[in-house]
């Protein structure tokens, strides 16, 4: 009986961890991350985010280089 309970608890833990990993990705469906002023779209592999340029969303403004400091 203890073996069955242990197996059940282990299975539930593994299912919980799998669901947590699936839900913990940063990129959400239908969510847009805009990299303002970027010249091309890119993916931040550390965060799991796809960044899109603002070309299709902004009609005015100036493109300027910013000092990174």
Image (cartoon, rainbow, N blue to C red):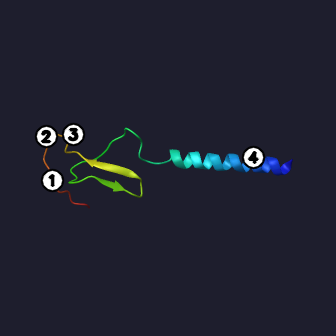
Q: How many marks?
A: 4
Residue that appears at 85% across and 49% down: 2
Where residue 30 appears, as percent x and y from the top left, is 37, 38
- Identify the residue under disc 2: 60
Distance from Cα at disc 2 to Cα at disc 4: 59 Å
- Identify the residue under disc 4: 8
- Identify the residue under disc 1: 64
| Marked residue nearer the N-terminal end (2 or 4) | 4
Q: Nearer the viewer, mark 1 or mark 2?
A: 2
Left of 49 or right of it: where is 67?
left
| Marked residue nearer the N-terminal end (4 or 1) | 4
Q: Secondary structure at mark 1?
A: loop
Where residue 68 appears, as percent x and y from the top left, is 25, 60
Left of 53 or right of it: where is 9?
right
Q: Secondary structure at mark 2?
A: loop
- Identify the residue under disc 3: 57
Q: Secondary structure at mark 3?
A: loop
Residue that appears at 57% across and 45% down: 19
Residue that appears at 27% across and 52% down: 41
Residue 42's quadrant in the figure?
bottom left
């Amino acid at each position: 009986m203890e073996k069955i309970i242990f197996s059940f608890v282990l299975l539930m833990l593994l299912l919980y961890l799998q669901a947590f990993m699936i839900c913990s990705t940063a990129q959400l469906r239908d969510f847009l991350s805009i990299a303002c002023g970027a010249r091309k779209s890119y993916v931040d592999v550390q965060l799991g985010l796809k960044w899109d340029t603002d070309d299709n969303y902004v009609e005015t403004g100036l493109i300027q280089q910013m000092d990174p400091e």
